[in-house]
Amino acid sequence: MTACSSPQDQATPTTAPATTTASSTSAQSPSPTALPAAADGTDLATCADGTCEVQVSAPGPIGLPQTAEAALSLASVGNASVTMAFAPTATNFSTDCDPLDACSNRLTLVEGGQGNVATVRVGAKMTFNKVSVVVVAVVGTSAVLRISPA
């Protein structure tokens, strides 16, 4: 059988309605754009009593009381972590991280003898001698640290 076309089948072609496609965006979770407000702002002098919550970004010392038995210095901030150097001001020193896998520690020589350099992820607590430091948040090269007696 042969197919034939009738004049009706040869009617003027119609244009199909235009279709639109929604452009897809990548499903990325939004990164934080601002740090939470630190209770003591950027005033590192508030740490002199051993208890403070401060925003930090520049490398340098963070003054602690003598009872902390440690000197603390900020080395760097970035990649959702903070790198800090601790130097003991007492004969012995101890370190601890909670959770354990959230810190990278290494012994190093610091002014006056041995010390500890620790890279601590957001949410972790690093304890050195009698001071604890919690990394509250990191955005870019700034962080909020909560410092308290251990």
Image: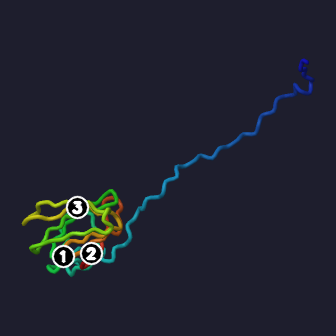
**Where residue 147 is drawn, which disc sits there?**
2
Q: Residues within 10 Å of mark 2 (few under 14, many from 20)?
A: many
The answer to whether residue 122 is left or right of residue 65 is: right
* Nearest the eye: 35 or 118: 118
Say what amino acid the circle numbered 3 marks.
Asn
Spatial separation of the CA atoms under disc 3 and disc 2 = 18 Å
First in sequence: mark 1 vs mark 3: 1
Q: Which of marks 2 and 1 is nearer the N terminus?
A: 1
SS of the residue under disc 3: strand
Residue 105: image tag: 3
Label 2 sits on what residue type?
A: Ile
Return the x and y of residue 11 as percentages of the image width and height: 87, 27
Circle 2/circle 1 CB separation < 8 Å: yes
Query: In the image, which disc is placed on residue 64?
Result: 1
* The N terminus - image quarter: top right
Of all residues, the one furthest to the left in this rendering is: 112
Circle 1 Cα neighbour tier, 10 Å, few/some/many (<14 / 14–19 / ≥20):
many
Disc 1 element: loop
Which residue is at a point 18% across and 69% down the rendered structure image?
72
Q: How far apart are marks 2 and 1 (CA)?
A: 9 Å
Residues marked 3 and 2 touching at CB (< 8 Å): no
